[in-house]
Amino acid sequence: MTANIRVTIWNEYRHERKSPEVAKIYPEGIHGTLAKALSEKGYTVRTATLDEPEHGLTDEVLENTDVMLWWGHMAHGEVRDEIVEKVHKRVLDGMGLVVLHSGHFSKIFKKLLGTDCDLKWRETNDKERMWVVAPGHPITEGIGDYIEIEHEEMYGEPFGIPEPDTLVFVSWFTGGEVFRSGCCYTRGQGKIFYFRPGHETLPTYHHPEVQLVISNAVRWANPTAARKLIRGNTPALEK
């Protein structure tokens, strides 16, 4: 039941307030658009933004979040390290994390993956054809062979990430580049999904198949089997 999955959508919410072009596409912010889409699919959704106290990620919010979405771009450096540490611990303890587009450079994603997460990019509104390379994976449910996005920012290889546990999507762009656009990881008890599309000046998050992938990813990342782990000095089981 999606209603039992508690989702927090985190967005730095800077482009939408600084750029009329972005505000026209996302009048309630990228987080608002995603919240509406996920709420319509039955999830219990709240949002949090960079300029709220504690970036909106209080202990209470984190403890009541099953899956977090993360979108950031121009203000990665303003995210406080102590908040990153708290999110990191929650992921290791089982909270799911879906990292979107330019969130690849976020502190939390780089900390969890342990690499620079750098890549090639170009803002020329290439056509993107995102191929499903893991048919049958839960994140691809309801998707055909590919998703086509008429205008998107190009991301290109090499992408500075560890080898994914599962590679779900590979994108091709009209400029000729390819990119690993859907990558699954496990860190501790938490599931992580990186999903590439979503440049702020383009209406990508209104695309129904993009919304479907994000919904599927939330359901996949839900911590259904998380439990408190016993660690440290422990007594022997046998006499």
Image: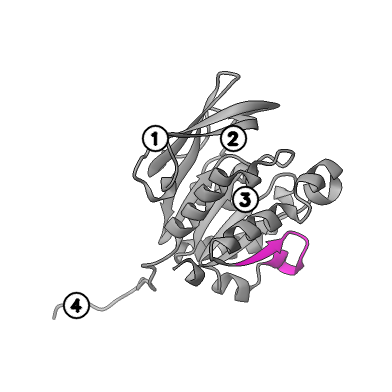
Which circle, 1 or 2, is nearer the viewer? 1
Q: Amino acid at mark 2?
A: Asp
- Gap between marks 4 and 3, in whole Å? 40 Å
- Which image quadrant: the N terminus? bottom left
Which structural element holds mark 1?
loop
- In the rendered structure, does residue 81 fall within the stretch colored magenta? no
Q: Few, some or many C-alpha atoms within 10 Å of disc 3 (few <14, some 14-19, many ≥20)? A: many
In the image, 1 versus 172, the foreground residue is: 1
Query: Which residue is tagged 4?
Result: 237
Which structural element holds mark 2?
loop
- Gap between marks 2 and 3, in whole Å? 12 Å
Counting labels gives 4
User: Relative to 100, is 236 above or below?
Assistant: below
N-term-proximal mark, 2 vs 3: 3
- In the rendered structure, does residue 50 fall within the stretch colored magenta? yes
Query: Which residue is tagged 2?
Result: 118
What x and y, as percent, mark residue 161?
Answer: 49, 38
At horizontal 35% and vertical 73% (from top left) the residue drawn is: 230
Query: Which residue is tagged 1?
Result: 133
Q: Few, some or many C-alpha atoms within 10 Å of disc 2 (few <14, some 14-19, many ≥20)? A: some
At horizontal 43% and vertical 46% (from top left) the residue drawn is: 142
Query: Which residue is tagged 3?
Result: 107
N-term-proximal mark, 1 vs 4: 1
Which structural element holds mark 3?
helix
N-term-proximal mark, 2 vs 4: 2
